[in-house]
Image: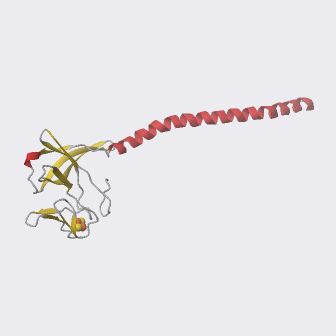
Amino acid sequence: MTDRAADRVAKGSAANLPRRRFFGRVITVIAAVVAAAWAVPLGIYAVAPALKRRIREWADAGAVTDLDVDRPRELDVVVSRRDGWQEVRAVKSFWAYRAKNGEAVAFSAICPHLGCAFQWRGDEGHFACPCHLSVFSLSGEVVSGPSPRPLDRLDVRVENGRLLVLPQDFKSGVRRKIPI
Ligand code: FES
């Protein structure tokens, strides 16, 4: 190749450089868009089961007329919930009674202090936790002991004479009622 020809080739390459850079950037942007288009559905697919785990369902706890007035009783319901891709069934306990005004009242059976099971002491008219001796009134207020908050009241509703309860666990040992 003559010097002039070599010079021309060198000039041509230099002229092509911005065009190559431009196409390089276009390809990078297209690759990023394609990656994002895949990442979003894949991310939703991966995260959706974990979100579903939080879905709560009303559980039938029996005839509301079976509840005694101002005398709590411990009841169990079986709940099923999705845990990832698995369907998990679990027994949830709670305390329930009918107040004098006819309202159904339910509390989680887990002590808000550190998670022990408490009992209703009918003779004394209060709930008592054996672990660290927290005492709660019929309405769930702390009477004495280390519990940082009242008993955790559960959502209930009555439908066709049936007591429906929304079982739920809450964080132990903190003042606020935080669902978990
Ligand atoms: Fe109930 Fe501590 S766990 S008082």
Direction right: furthest residue: 3
- Residue 115: image x %, image y %? 25, 62
Q: As drawn, is 151 to the left or to the right of 176?
A: left
169 or 121: which is nearer to us? 121
Find residue 15 and report its horizontal and vertical position in percent: 81, 32
Q: How many labels does the image show?
A: 0
Residue 67 versus residue 40 in the image, above or below: below
Residue in the image at 12% along x and 49% along y = 102
The residue at the point 84 percent across, 34 percent down is: 10
Residue 127: image quadrant is bottom left
Residue 42 position within the rendered picture, expressed as x and y whole percent measured from the top left = 45, 38
Q: Can residue 93 be seen in this view?
A: no
Quadrant of the image for the N terminus?
A: top right
Left or right: residue 29 versus residue 54 is right
Residue 4 as seen in the image, left or right of residue 100 = right
Query: How are the colours assigned in the image?
Result: secondary structure
User: In what quadrant does ligand 1 lie?
Assistant: bottom left
Image height of 138 relative to 35, above or below: below
Q: In the figure, 54 relative to 131: above or below?
A: above
Q: Position of residue 174 (x, y in %)?
A: 32, 63
Front residue of 48/154: it is: 154
Q: Residue furthest front?
A: 101
Toward which corner of the image does residue 175 lie, by quadrant? bottom left
Residue 123 visible in image: yes
Nearest the viewer among 118 and 23 is: 118
Q: What's the residue at 55%, 34% (across, down)?
A: 34
Location of residue 15 with respect to 51 vertically, above or below: above
